[in-house]
Structure formats: C-alpha cells, structure tokens
Amino acid sequence: MVKVTVCGAAGGIGQPLSLMFKLNPYVTTLALYDVVNVPGVGKDLSHIDTDTKLESYLPENDGLEKALTGSDLVIIPAGVPRKPGMTRDDLFAINAGIIRDLANGIAQFAPSAFVLVISNPVNSTVPIVAEILKKSNVFNPQKLFGVTTLDCVRANTFVAELSKDKEASAFDTRVLGGHSGETIVPVFSQSAPEVYKELSDEQKAALVHRVQFGGDEVVKAKNGAGSATLSMAYAGYKLGHALLAAINDTPGIIESTFVYLKDSKIKGATEAYKYINEKLKDSDSSDVDFFALPVVLSSNGIEEIKWDILEKVDAKETELLKIATGQLSKNIAKGTAFIAGN
Ligand code: NAI
C-alpha cells in the first residue's frame, strides 16, 4: 500500500507527472493537491483504468491535510516557472513561501514521508524544507531529495548526440553540485569516458555548458509559456519510480540527488561534506551543507552517498566543482536564512 501525493498537480509538470504515477503499479493511492484546477485534472485521470485510487484536493476543507495524511511519498512541483531572461534564483521571492507552507504541512501531516522537491530554485528550496522539518524535529536526511534528475537526463541525451555508436539510453551520467547554471557539474570523465576522451577541449566545454544551461533552451523555445515540463515530469517520475522500486526491495539502485550532508548519519555523508568543504570551497564562503551526488537507494531512502566520485573527477571538472561550491554556498544560505528570519 503506497500513497503518493503530488503538490502542484494541476501545473505544467504536475499534470504529466500525475499521469505517470497513475500508471505506476506500486502506487495504490494518488493524491493530487493544488490551489487551482485540480478537481478537473483529478476527474480526468480517475477515468484511467489502472487500479490506483485517485483523490484530488484544493486548499479548502482541509485539503492539504487530507492530501498529505498517510502519504509515503510527497513530490512537489508547486510554484512559478521561469520566463525568458529569468534565472532560477529570480523565482525565490514567490516559491520560497509556497515551499515553506507545504513543508509545514508535511511536518504536521506526513512527517515520515519521502519528500522530492522539484520547485526552483532547488538549491534554496531544499534547504527551506530541511529547516522546516528540523524545526518540527522530524527531519530525516535519508528522506529528503532535491530533484536534479533532469540534469542527468539532459547530460545523457546531449552526450549521445556526440557519440558515434551509442543511443541516449546507453549512458548514466552523474551530475554533481546543484541545480542551476554553473552549480550543475556533469562528470563525463567518469560517466561517459569513451566519448569524452575523443572530444577536444572546446567540445568538452560546449557539452558541459549545454548541460548547465539546457533549461534555457526550453525556456527560449517556449517563448514565455514557461520552462521544461514534459522532460521534467519524466525526470521526476524516474527518480520517484526508482525510490518506489527501492522501497519495494529492489537492491542497488543508484540515482543522483541533491542531498543533505552536514551531521548526517548516512554512509558517506561525512566524507562528502569534508571533501567538499575542505577541498572544493573557499574558506570564506559559508558551508555547503547540500550537494548533488550519486546515492544508493533502499527501503530507508538514501542508504549511502557515493562520495568517492569527487576524488576521481579530472582537473577541469574539479575547477568547475570549485566554481559550483561558491554559488551553492550562497544559494543554500539564502534558503536557510529565509526560515531563520520567518
Ligand atoms: P506551473 O505554473 O505550470 O505549475 C505550478 C503549479 O503549482 C500550478 O498549478 C499552481 O497552481 C501550483 N501552485 C502554486 N502555489 C501552490 C501552493 N501553495 N500549493 C500547491 N500548488 C501550488 O509551473 P511548472 O512549469 O509546472 O513548474 C513548477 C516548478 O518546477 C517551477 O518552480 C519550476 O521552476 C520548477 N522546475 C524544476 C525543474 C527541476 O529540474 N528541478 C525543472 C523544471 C521546472
């Protein structure tokens, strides 16, 4: 019996994401929550002849409480997306408050659920959720995931375009750091070495840049109608499905996610935290408490952090990781301060 809740279910990401969860055999109840339009989305999906039970809730009549109570996995694509010319950080002013309120609901009504945060800026919204859960003494780092899967998905697609003989599905690229611009660091030297070593330095730089700013391609092509929704729904579903499979005892699944490191008991967290803060960050920037890294999933959520990839990356990637930590430390501090100041 697994209940999944999608917060922001009537949006551009929320609708296709909910459709995919309605088709997932692990999910017994799918609860949709949004501030608008969700009864229509829920009614529509409820006609699909899979066995997943559909519930949909607006805020009135304790909708958030009902959507979250008993939930095992909460996935959050709620909030506003980018328009051309905006950075993800420009979304903070609106999305930070939305995420804070949803996190308060999770702390109260679904304190032991797995939480997957899609809403941008992920580098700051995930720290907001962590701070709220800490305040309520229900924070479990094994269960909080910042969704950076789309960066891995894009990296696989883009590197395949440069490969002579392999399709996108042949790649499993690890992307480290965070989820915005230069905080996104794909490590092709470890993930796709056979393609990477054939590239010139210019081609390598162009490939990395394309992954870092791939979201802008979509924002530009949509021309004011938002950012990635369908590829994002796929990516969010990919992580969600991997977690559901792990909860149902499929061993050894590895996915990358933006994970909390400081004082965490997760295997590999201390090593990751030390390596990032001692070797990849200026001593005058504030601590980088979160980082996107490959993690091993289990029925507990994040079982182990595969931090040793940090030691294996090449010199250029190390340089990129150092740039990433400088920005990340500011983004994380911004999220943390938002809750401290509220
Ligand atoms: P959208 O505007 O189409 O949908 C957002 C939905 O959230 C709307 O239905 C809206 O009514 C709902 N919402 C607003 N306030 C809410 C609240 N308090 N509680 C519940 N629902 C609420 O936006 P879209 O395109 O679906 O993007 C959603 C978020 O995902 C944006 O912040 C976007 O930047 C982010 N995103 C993240 C990516 C990632 O890789 N992590 C990739 C692409 C987008």
Image (cartoon, rainbow, N blue to C red):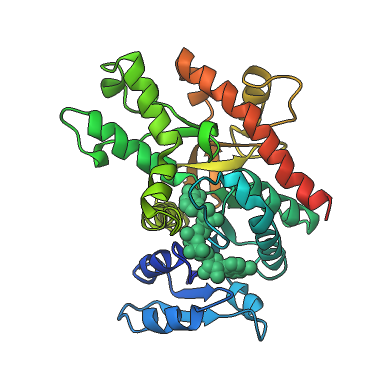
Of 301 and 65, nearer the camera is: 65
Closer-to-camera residue (42/138)? 42
Q: Quadrant of the C terminus?
A: bottom right
Q: Is residue 32 above or below residue 186?
A: below
314 to the left or right of 261: left
Give coordinates of residue 194: x percent, y percent.
26, 21
Task: Name the quadrant containing residue 44.
Answer: bottom left
The quadrant holding residue 73 is bottom right
Residue 163 placed where, x, y %? 21, 28
Is residue 56 toward the left or the right of residue 270 in the image? left
Q: Residue at x 42, y 84 (%)?
A: 43
Residue 264 visible in the displayed image? no
| Residue 48 or residue 39, whichever sits in front | 39
Q: Position of residue 252 (x, y in %)?
A: 41, 42
Residue at figure coordinates x 25%, y 37% from the top left: 170
Q: Residue furthest right?
A: 341
Residue 259 x/y as whole percent: 59, 42
Residue placed farthest to the left in the image?
A: 165
Vertical position of residue 135 compared to residue 42: above or below: above
Taking the spot 59% from the left edge, 52% from the top edge, the residue there is 143
Answer yes or no: is residue 165 visible. Answer: yes
Specify whether 294 is left or right of 271.
left
Numbered marks: total: 0
When the figure is inspected, residue 26 is found, relative to residue 326, above or below; the finding is below
At a point 57% along the width and 58% down the height, the residue shown is: 114
